[in-house]
Image: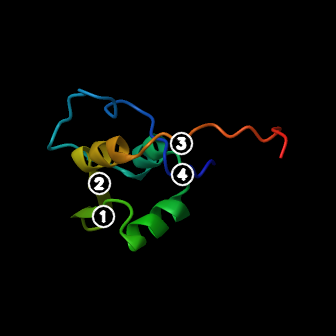
Amino acid sequence: MKENPTSCSGVGNGAGAKVNSNRYLRQPEVLERVGVSWMTLLRWEKQGRFPRRRKIGPRIVAWPEAEIVEWCASREIAPAVDKGAAK
């Protein structure tokens, strides 16, 4: 899986998207939207580079959708790098 900290995909991350402030996203949906591995997400969370998950049940954690959308919106799109360019 690509670990590009500047990419976000999925519904609700575009400008003007309506976000349900009461909705929580579980791990698979967060990973799909952010496009990184689970270990990268945990590392970013520990480093304070990603929103912290919330415990919503005895064995269930999730992230507020609004925080994920806001985080994605705050990421800049990295320019494409041409690996075949002459040095």
The foreground one among 85 and 33 is: 85
Disc nearer the start of the sequence (4/1): 4
Distance Cα–Cα, label 2 vs label 1? 7 Å
- Secondary structure under tag 2 reads strand
Distance Cα–Cα, label 4 vs label 3? 15 Å
Disc nearer the start of the sequence (4/3): 4
Give the crowd class for mark 4: few <14, some 14-19, many >=20 residues within 10 Å. Answer: some
Q: Which residue is mark 4?
A: 36
Nearer mark to the viewer, of 2 and 4 = 4
Q: Which residue is mark 1?
A: 52
Disc nearer the start of the sequence (1/3): 1
- 30 with respect to 80 (left or right): left
Q: Which residue is mark 3?
A: 78
Q: Amino acid at mark 3?
A: Ala
Q: Which residue is mark 2?
A: 63
Q: Amino acid at mark 4?
A: Val
Give the crowd class for mark 3: few <14, some 14-19, many >=20 residues within 10 Å. Answer: few
Disc nearer the start of the sequence (2/4): 4
Q: Residue at x 27, y 45 (%)?
A: 70
Residue 21: x and y in percent read 15, 42
Q: Residue at x 36, y 30 (%)?
A: 11
- 11 with respect to 44 (left or right): left
The foreground one among 22 and 60 is: 22
Q: Are marks 2 and 1 in contact (CB under 8 Å)?
A: yes
Quarter location, residue 85 = top right
Q: How many marks?
A: 4
Quarter location, residue 52 = bottom left
Which colour style is shown?
rainbow
